[in-house]
Amino acid sequence: MRIEMMVNANAESHDVEARTLLVHYLRDAVGLTGTNVGCDTTSCGACTVLMNGESVKSCTVLAAQAAGEAITTIEGLGDEFGQMDRVQQAFQDCHGLQCGYCTPGMVMAVTSLLRENPEPTEADVRLGLEGNLCRCTGYHNIVEAALAASRVHEVHQ
Amino acid sequence: MIPASFDYVRAATVEEAIDLLVQHGDDAKLLAGGHSLLPLMKMRLAQPALLVDIAPLRALSYVRDEHDHVAVGALTRHHDLANSPVAISGASVLAHVAGQIGDPQVRHRGTIGGSIAHGDPASDLPAVLLALGATMVAQGPTGRREISAADFFVSFFEVALAPDEVLVEVRVPKSSPGQWGFEKLTKRAQDWAIVGAVAVRSSSGVGVGLINMGPVPLRASGVEAAIASGKDAKEAAELASEGTEPSADFNGSLEYRQHVARVLVRRALEKVGV
């Protein structure tokens, strides 16, 4: 079936099987491999992308369910000149990663969290990231990065 | 993991979804948020030939104040229920529990109707609806009918919906903020409950529900009767495991779950002032 959706503000249209998961549509049909497949069981959050601005686990969404919706992946966050956005920059500044495998999902989950709660407490961040696992257990700096990103928002306002 | 092949169709109306269910019978399965069904399909534990996607039916996503009860559209997402001012004021236990399901990503997709129609005894919402004395509204080819929560959960992953019926609404009697207790034991934040308990105080007494203590969500009627006869939280909670047959797995034995149920029920009862 032909499935059309907006991905990072680009109109995409691809012929895929109905059973194609959103994560495979993004990686294999669109060619954006920044979104990782982790556990493939809705647990780890490595495949987190935004659907209409809200975090979802793309291993548990059919591409067909996302037809007509707006998807944002990690590739869609920076600007056209390759400048990272505030969440990505905060992850670099705070060293909020070790192996980096969970990072795209973490960054998208933090992006969604900050849209819903622009001034989170540390507890808000820890609860808000309950759907994202880091096997390096680098949570401390990830939480620091989320809080640092929220403060950048305040300065810009 | 890739699901087995299926055909996919989006229903434009509830009536169209019912027509498709009538036409395709057991081969068809309704799809809402997909956070119960898709994992089963990926593990090939479910292989429907046709998925009827009803998630885009925005008319079934609402939380309304209906005087003596709160009406929740079946396709209301957990995220929207948890943040609904109507739910927070009129059915705060429901809003709270919806906000405890899974994780933010799951709550952005999962719906109350999908969760309930799935009939998983480890789910949080069914036990809450039992304790509240909720009513489900199902729509089929001949119209709508009401099903009480007590009659809805039939057996393990089986509910009282007919194969050609769509769950369209959940009606919850209003309860007061602060007049409930909800306790859930998990090893990790996003996990299903190993055991859970909910207590809700209303004008007709205290309702108590149990999560994951048998093949269906349970109402702890022995505990409720003990409270009605004047027993305190500790005495009443001792009856929480009576008649329960929770399954044993790597999270705990039958005896462990029964012990945890008594502890969680006592804590929930203390929160409603028993």
Image (cartoon, coloured by chain):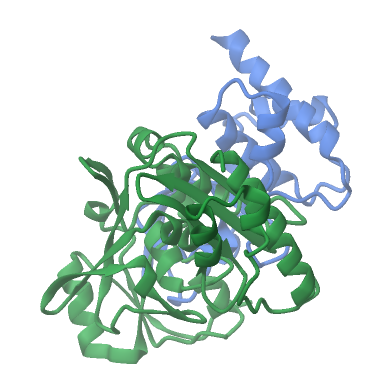
Chain colours: A blue, B green
- Tell me if residue B75 comes above or below residue A149 in the rendering: below
- Tell me if residue B79 comes above or below residue B157 in the rendering: above
- For the point 28% across and 90% down, which residue is it? B25
Q: Nearer the viewer, residue B217 or A136?
A: B217
- For the point 74% across and 26% down, which residue is it? A90
- For the point 63% across and 62% down, which residue is it? A42
* Extreme-left residue of the structure: B142
Quadrant of the snapshot with the N terminus of chain B: bottom right
- Tell me if residue A153 comes above or below residue B154 in the rendering: above
- State whether residue B248 appears in this view: yes
Position in image of residue B3 (x %, y %): 54, 80
- For the point 52% across and 69% down, which residue is it? B218
Rendering quarter of residue A97: top right
- State whether residue A43 appears in this view: no
- Position of A109 with respect to A157 (left or right) is right
Position in image of residue A86 (x %, y %): 65, 24
Position in image of residue A93 (x %, y %): 81, 24
Position in image of residue B117 (x %, y %): 40, 71
